[in-house]
Amino acid sequence: MDYLPLIIQLLSGAVGGNLAGKLMPSASMGTMVNSILGILGGGLGGQLLGMLGMAPQTGMDLMGIIGNIAAGGVGGGVFMAIIGIIKSMMGSKS
């Protein structure tokens, strides 16, 4: 198994999670939590898109790297935003 695409997805997921936190301050939970949620979302999102055939899982050509960065970044940002919105909605009802 080639671990480099997964590492790229995890790192870009952390960046995506923090970028989503900056763009949505009401859903942000701090740099550390945003990074952790982004890493989880980047790994899950990248693997899910890879299974659907939308992101290349192998090959370290330029398109493969860009695909893994995009899949991880989007997955990390979306996952962090969803968890942040759920957390803020739960906090507002209390």
Image (spheres, rainbow, N blue to C red):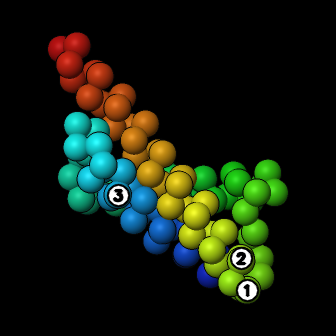
- Provide the residue designation for mark 2: 64
Residue type (three-letter) at the residue carrying disc 1: Asp
Q: Quadrant of the C terminus?
A: top left
Q: Position of residue 11 (x, y in %)?
A: 46, 71
Q: Is residue 17 above or below residue 85?
A: below
Distance in Å between CA atoms under marks 1 and 3: 26 Å
Q: Residue at 60% of width from left, 53% of height from top?
A: 45
Q: Position of residue 64 (x, y in %)?
A: 71, 76
Q: Earlier in the sequence, mark 1 or mark 3?
A: 3
Q: Position of residue 77 (x, y in %)?
A: 44, 51
Q: Quadrant of residue 47?
A: bottom right
- How many residues crowd mark 2 within 10 Å: few (<14), some (14–19), many (20+)? some
Q: Position of residue 86 (x, y in %)?
A: 36, 28
Assess whether mark 1 and mark 2 are in contact (beta carbons under 8 angstroms).
Answer: yes
Looking at the rendered structure, the secondary structure element under dot 1 is: loop
Distance in Å between CA atoms under marks 3 and 2: 22 Å
Say which mark, if any, is on residue 19. 3
Q: Residue at 36% of width from left, 51% of height from top?
A: 20
Q: Residue at 24% of width from left, 59% of height from top?
A: 31
Q: Residue at 29% of width from left, 43% of height from top?
A: 24
- How many residues crowd mark 1 within 10 Å: few (<14), some (14–19), many (20+)? few
Residue type (three-letter) at the residue carrying disc 3: Leu
- Provide the residue designation for mark 1: 61
